Amino acid sequence: MSVNLLDFNATALAGFCAEIGEKPFRAKQLLRWIHRFGEADFAGMSELAKGLREKLSANAVIEPPQLITDHTAADGTRKWLLSVGGGNGIETVFIPEVSRGTLCISSQVGCALACTFCSTGRQGFNRNLTVAEIIGQLWWANKALAVGPEGDSAPSRTERVITNVVMMGMGEPLANFENVVTALDLMLDDNAYGLSRRRVTVSTSGLVPAMDRLRERCPVALAVSLHAPNDSLRDQLVPINRKYPIKELLAACKRYLQAAPRDFITFEYVMLDGVNDSPGHARELLRLTADVPCKFNLIPFNPFPNSGFKRSPSEVVSRFRDVLMRAGLVTTVRKTRGDDIDAACGQLAGKVLDKTQRGSRALAGVPR
């Protein structure tokens, strides 16, 4: 049975090469061909001996997720729906900006954490993505966004359009720990994508033990979906808080900073009209995070059908931001990008064959 080489980081690829009787340096060559040059056909890997290419063809494949749809928003944001089999689809979003291009990658088919304001969570959960399905999103986007080779020699690396990767798509990355970390290895590997740890961000709703494991295994930039300044409200909005309350979460954040590539944690905070957006809530946040080096990213809520929430008015968001900024906290308000193609934060839904039946219960009005 053929293996999918997109599932392998450098260590695993070296092991595979040994199994087929090849030297370890072949792993580096394969990494460059697969990830740097985006080659999926062994016959096109001209640097490799014919015998090796035949051996690879007999034992392996390079198989990224397959494209279902490709949409571009008026602001240039691009969203791909990719098939991961069994009737399931995941969504990947590219956000172009003047000085950088950010790819938002999914880690699961749906999400089991059921945050009440999130369209992805409302869809329910099917399964974790494989390494190939995670890194395959970056592989696919690099191919789709390529603007041509640098120089005349072949093979040559295409111009880097994607400068940043955020694990903020469908799913909770740290609930799929091993596969996500293996994909992170590839993102950081100089023979693959060569991104710096500062330019790769993992977002979590607060899986405390996995945050500690990430700190030890592969510390990249960390964003924490906070969304409330106290446990009673966060219990409602982010149910995982009932297992790992805010005090434990903030302690894990401080531990994470000991190894993090940035000297702050980014707290993400979706602004829900009349729910968590008062100046009093902002002052609670200041007290809560007083001893945690951090910045805040305020996210306008992006509506979806039957959500039960409304977006905070812009003047309310501004007042909230000003309370934080006057206290010296770096605070940004995320621009809403791609909402005309449902590519904005919290809107990714994909195609999820829900094993939890959460989606059908919600439609029937049954409490989650």
Image (tube, rainbow, N blue to C red):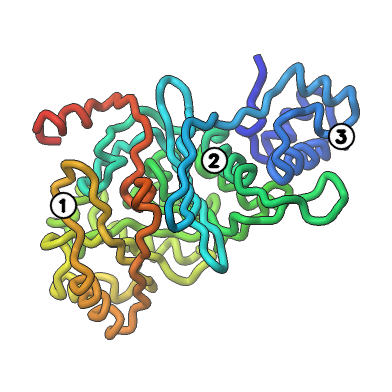
Residue 159 or residue 358, whichever sits in front = 159
Residue at mark 3 to residue at mark 1: CA–CA distance: 55 Å
For marks 3 and 2 on the same chain, the one whose residue lies earlier in the sequence: 3
* Residue 326 location, quadrant: bottom left
For marks 2 and 1 on the same chain, the one whose residue lies earlier in the sequence: 2
Q: Is residue 204 above or below residue 266?
A: above
Q: Residue at x 15, y 33 (%)?
A: 362
Q: Amino acid at mark 2?
A: Gln
Residue at mark 3 to residue at mark 2: CA–CA distance: 25 Å
- Can you see residue 45? yes
Residue 61 or residue 287, whichever sits in front = 61
Residue 360 rendering spot, x and y as whole percentages: 19, 27
Residue 199 or residue 146, whichever sits in front = 146
Q: Is residue 253 above or below residue 356?
A: below
Q: Amino acid at mark 3?
A: Ser
Q: Amino acid at mark 1?
A: Phe
Residue 110 shown left or right of residue 358 in the figure: right
Q: Which residue is mark 2?
A: 137
Q: Residue at x 64, y 26 (%)?
A: 4
Mark 2 element type:
helix
Q: Which residue is mark 3?
A: 46
Residue 123 shown left or right of residue 16 in the figure: left
Instruction: Give the class, few, some or many, for how many residues have Cα within 10 Å of label 3's Cα (few <14, many ≥20).
Output: few
Quarter of the image with the C terminus in it: top left
Residue 8 shown left or right of residue 362 in the figure: right
Mark 3 element type:
loop
Q: Which residue is mark 1?
A: 309
* Residue 38 location, quadrant: top right
